[in-house]
Amino acid sequence: MIELDNGGGFGVRGELHPEDFLIPAAARVAGRPVKWIEDRREHLMSANHSREIDCEVEIACRRDGTILAIRSRISANMGAYIRPNGGVVPAKAAQFLVGAYRIENVEIEVVFALSNKTPMGTFRGPGRFETGFFRDRIIDIAAHDLGIDPADMRRRNLVTLAEMPYVLGKLVPYEGVAVFDTGDFPATFERAIVEIGYERLKHRNGRLIDGRYHGVAVTSCVENSGPGPRENARMRLTPKGVIEIHVGSSSMGQGLETIFAQIAGEALGLSLTALEVFRGSTTHLPVGMGTYASRAVVMGGSTVLVTAKKLEAELRAFASEIGANSLELSPEVVAHLAGEAAARGRRLDVEGAFENSTPTYSSGAHAAYVAVDPKTGHVEVLDYVAIEDVGRAINPALVHGQAIGGLVQGLGGAFLDHLVYDADGQLLTASFADYLLPTASDFPNVRAVTLEDHPSPSNPLGAKGAGEGPIVNVAGTIGNAIAEALRPLGVRI
């Protein structure tokens, strides 16, 4: 398996499609390389679809807004057959229905049906995006029924820092007991309140201003990431004096080459120019677990750190063996060691692994301020801010890019890029003329704030996932903001 640059893959690359078997089989029969090309229409029709989930949900509360229980029936359209990860989507929708809230009594039923549509698969924040909408809509509806500010109702029910680690229980049959590791959910929520200016803007809810109804909403979110059980890496010193880093984590354009080089460089005390990163190929590393569920830095980065320490010990031992004057690593010392190793036929090559089955939990809050045209239904996002505590941001610029990308992708899912079928199951949106992707001009007013207040205790970097968290609460936050705007018209989202 040789990994090439793929430019991105939010879920599609996580499934085995029929051609994934047919292409190598054909190559074996033909005895020569086989190249397969699909056009845009084929891709939109055949690559896994996602998000088509309905939920009937009930909530029980005290009059003061304390949530006592939640009960739901989650229904998913799985398409014509089950793809390998298809069941993950409705399962995660159930697992994350309670979100960051203290809800002791939970009953969730998950059902799914087959249809004549393209099969369901995972897509950035699978199940979390959908269930964030269900949860945050029902909380806002309940708050208005009780005559309570939705923000105050959330404050009353958020799990607090003093309750960490917080045990949620066994939420899905095939996983262990879920436990929030660290995080201050109320603090991130209050940060979002301040950033959006909620106390000032809430008085505009439902007001007609310059021909548009205005609305503001704030929600809280939590996302697990970094699943194990392990990840592998290999490092070797080449005769040219460059340290090669081979990792089992795949790159989808999220900057892993830079991040892994940073981690190794800091561990070894070397600049990035002395390091070269290779990923996802069996040529030099036989086993790797890949990239999914925001695990690349949590597991892959921790593996790079562990392996770098092993290589450092190997280099120091070799330096002592050849009587080198300095044991402090520098580009010059590494180059000298490389030359000596080549002359002696010595391989300075180590493999390492990091094992951990305890997921991390990044947490945060989203806030949206919108204006809705009552004649056309057009929604203008006047301001959107997302707060996320990722434990530790190895490269803040890349984390910020992930956050903005997730927000815009979530807004696209709410407003634009929809897979529309006719009554006979024929896909109608099979080109970019019909399947509308968001651009910078669609949502120019989005902001993201990254916090590093509560590192994860389950990995040596203290990192938590940062790739999927930014998308998970977009639908719920936008839905609530629109509902607030259109409340005078009797509209219920």
Image (cartoon, rainbow, N blue to C red):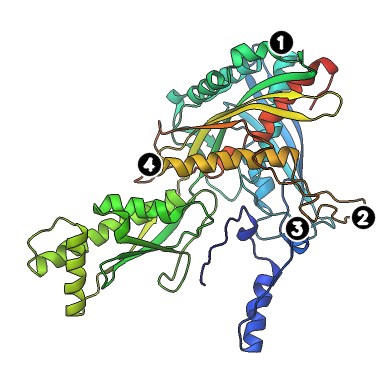
186 to 462, vertically: above or below: above
Alpha carbons under labels 2 and 4: distance apart: 51 Å
Amino acid identity at mark 3: Leu
Alpha carbons under labels 4 and 3: distance apart: 38 Å
- Whether the residues at callouts 1 and 3 have beta carbons within 8 Å, the answer is no
According to the picture, the residue beneath numbered tag 2 turns out to be 424
According to the picture, the residue beneath numbered tag 1 turns out to be 147
- Whether the residues at callouts 1 and 2 have beta carbons within 8 Å, the answer is no
* Left or right: residue 402 compared with residue 345: right
Asked where in the image residue 130 lies, by quadrant, the reply is top right
- Whether the residues at callouts 4 and 3 have beta carbons within 8 Å, the answer is no
Alpha carbons under labels 1 and 4: distance apart: 41 Å
Q: Say which element carries label 4.
A: loop
Q: Earlier in the sequence, mark 1 or mark 3?
A: 3
- Whether the residues at callouts 2 and 3 have beta carbons within 8 Å, the answer is no
Q: How crowded is mark 2: few (under 14 residues within 10 Å), some or many (20 or more)?
A: few
Q: Which mark is residue 44?
A: 3
59 to 15, vertically: above or below: above
Q: Say which element carries label 3.
A: helix
- Whether the residues at callouts 1 and 4 have beta carbons within 8 Å, the answer is no
According to the picture, the residue beneath numbered tag 4 turns out to be 462
- Residue situated in front as seen by the camera: 51 or 375: 375
Q: Which mark is residue 254?
A: none
